[in-house]
């Protein structure tokens, strides 16, 4: 299992290197665009969600209610997440690559395994893949660097 996780992380890093060839070799440990506190933007996320055709209204509402409760904080010391005011994760991250519109980070997930994630930044907005299909969770900056 550990070998599989290492292989997956290596493949992801290879894809990132191919996608961002000049940035992949970067040794930067932070990107000032990430620094600060980001709050889940429930309205924008729900507006952009793609639900399966025929999904009933109550299920759509339960899914929509999951958003708007997560806060991400990026510092030069690490990445912290809070859900409804309770710290749910605190971990170090490293920048794998970046370009003019995104930053790719790697960190240890749960269970301990490398996670590579691309964060798109547009001014005071940040969005990232929401884990299933074509859905993204949107965040807005609430406190700057």
Image: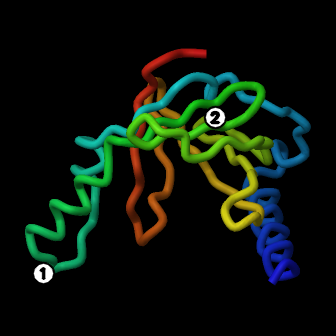
- Residue 135 position, x and y percent, is 38, 61
> Is residue 60 left or right of 91 when viewed as pictured?
left
Q: Nearer the viewer, residue 119 or 94?
A: 94
Q: Which residue is mark 1?
A: 54
Q: Which residue is depicted at the point 42% across and 33% down?
A: 39
> Is residue 49 left or right of 81 when viewed as pictured?
left
Where is 2 relative to 140, above or below?
Answer: below
Q: Secondary structure at mark 1?
A: loop
Q: Of callouts 1 and 2, which one flags the residue occurring earlier in the amino acid sequence?
A: 1
Which numbered disc, 1 or 2, marks the residue closer to the eye? 1
- Residue 81 position, x and y percent, is 55, 40
Q: Quadrant of residue 8?
A: bottom right
Q: Secondary structure at mark 2?
A: loop
Q: Which residue is depicted at the point 75% across and 58% down?
A: 16
Q: Could you give the CA–CA distance between mark 1 and mark 2, rounded to whole angstroms?
A: 38 Å
Q: Residue furthest left?
A: 57
Q: Which residue is depicted at the point 84% across and 48% down?
A: 24
- Residue 128 position, x and y percent, is 50, 50
> Is residue 133 left or right of 74 when viewed as pictured?
left
Q: Quadrant of the N terminus?
A: bottom right
Q: Quadrant of residue 70?
A: top left
Q: Which residue is depicted at the point 43% across and 70% down?
A: 132
Which labelled disc corresponds to residue 100? Answer: 2
């Amino acid at each position: 299992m550990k070998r599989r996780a290492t292989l997956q992380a290596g493949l992801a890093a290879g894809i990132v290197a191919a996608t961002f060839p000049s940035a992949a070799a970067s040794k930067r440990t932070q990107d000032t665009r990430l620094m600060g506190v980001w709050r889940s933007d429930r309205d924008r996320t729900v507006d952009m969600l793609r639900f399966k055709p025929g999904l009933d209204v109550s299920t759509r509402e339960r899914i929509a209610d999951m958003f708007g409760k997560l806060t991400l904080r990026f510092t030069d010391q690490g990445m912290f997440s809070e859900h409804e005011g309770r710290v749910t994760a605190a971990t170090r991250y490293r920048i794998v690559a970046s370009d003019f519109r995104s930053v790719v980070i790697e960190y240890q997930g749960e269970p301990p395994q490398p996670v590579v994630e691309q964060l798109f930044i547009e001014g005071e907005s940040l969005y990232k893949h929401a884990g299933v299909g074509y859905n993204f969770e949107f965040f807005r900056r609430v406190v700057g660097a």
